[in-house]
Image (cartoon, helix red, strand yellow):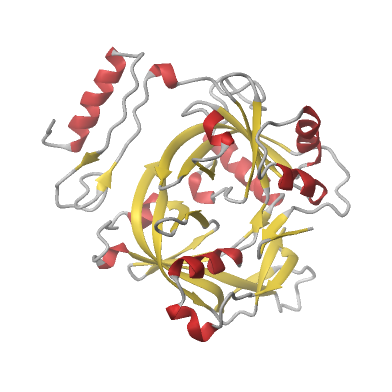
Amino acid sequence: MTFDRLPQAVAFLQQLVDSHPDTVYGYCAMDRAEATWPDAPAKSLYSANIFSPALRSEPNSTSTSSGDEKGLSAAERQQAVGDIGHHTVTNYYRCTFDGAEIELDNFRGCSMQPEQVVLFVTDDEFFKRASLVAEDPLNQVRVELLAPRPSTSSSSSSSSLMLDERKTGVTADLSLKNISVVGGCAVVQAVVTAVSLGEAEFVQAIYRDTYLAKRAVALDVPRSKLPFYPLDKQTKTLLRQMPSAMWVVSTSAAHGEDLAMTATSVTVPAAARGMICFNVGHSSAFYAGLGGVGAGVRLFALSTRQKDIAERYVTRAALGKEDRTRVEEECMVAASCTIEHTEDVQDHHIVLTKIDGVKVPEKDEEGLMPLVWQHGKLMT
């Protein structure tokens, strides 16, 4: 079916869904207009989510949501992002597009085959002029992992960090693949086209503005051979440098079983205004039991006491009662969320969730640190 404008197509499909609430619809649409953004995207795919009321389920009963029946306000969700960030590790990135720069606090590998696809979330305004045509200059992006260093200010009594603009740990050149606008933020998928290493000798895991640990930039191949090394292996080397907090994501499947998976892909982007993003592989048992938009999930940032749990739920999905108690009581911070948006990327599923509540377990924090994955190892 053809419409003069994309909004007309969306309106038609929404009416169709509303009139047939027990039927599930999915669609994609191509707009042939001359602009380069979802208002009238040229040469690019624009997709939106319309869901039958039959798919809109309530969050699960484990939610710690506070406030009125609609959950947290926008301001409360933004505060929740800060609360979560206080209890987990942070990375700093610089994103360059069309001569402009923006700071990022999130960047993750998403799917490695057949293309090496990465994911990050930023403010939707930054990419409004973007193109999804690979040959277009407005399709090219660079993301650099910045190497923080201790502040040299004599007036500073703390070990606060500064971003050393002269040094980067690793750099990825990207070609934009897809941009979805959700709640005022842009969920960006991009294909890695080149990888390079900066001058920094170490990449640090940062916790509460101090070094949690630092590891030397490790290579699987000499620097001199990087341009000729297979790109998929270069990308793997790139992603291994970036410290990732270890999380467990849990949900209740339709048949009532509690499921869990270990995840390094969880990000809590400031630009997402109170939302959390994670990826799940299509072949996993967790994905088979994960609900759609409106379903509830819980996310737990693991502590150094929970290495065994992190290892267990890489291959196991059924969440045991004892482990559920330990996850809740020993984690750094827990967030109850409702799935807001999903999309598929090759062999993975992107999930963007809205924060309904945050809980910091009562525990003795002396010596307790976030559990971190870097260079293929758990850092405890």
Q: Measuring from the top left, give residue 184's x and y in whole percent.
A: 41, 43
Quadrant in the picture for the N terminus: top left
**Residue sitting at x 27%, y 37%:** 28
**Residue sitting at x 78%, y 49%:** 307
| Residue 193 vs residue 106, the one in the foreground | 193
Q: Is residue 157 left or right of residue 318?
A: right
- The answer to whether residue 183 of the structure is visible from this angle is no
| Residue 154 vs residue 344, the one in the foreground | 344
Q: Residue 48 is drawn in which quadrant?
A: top left
Q: Is residue 164 left or right of residue 360?
A: left
- The answer to whether residue 352 of the structure is visible from this angle is yes
Q: Residue 209 is drawn in which quadrant?
A: bottom right
Q: Measuring from the top left, give residue 269's x and y in whole percent.
A: 54, 50
**Residue sitting at x 11%, y 36%:** 4
Q: How many tags in the picture?
A: 0
Quadrant in the picture for the C terminus: bottom right
Q: Measuring from the top left, give residue 53's x and y in whole percent.
A: 40, 17
Q: Is residue 230 above or below residue 78?
A: below
Furthest toward the bottom, the residue is 224
Q: Is residue 58 above or below residue 93?
A: above
**Residue sitting at x 37%, y 45%:** 180
Q: Measuring from the top left, give residue 73's x and y in whole percent.
A: 55, 32
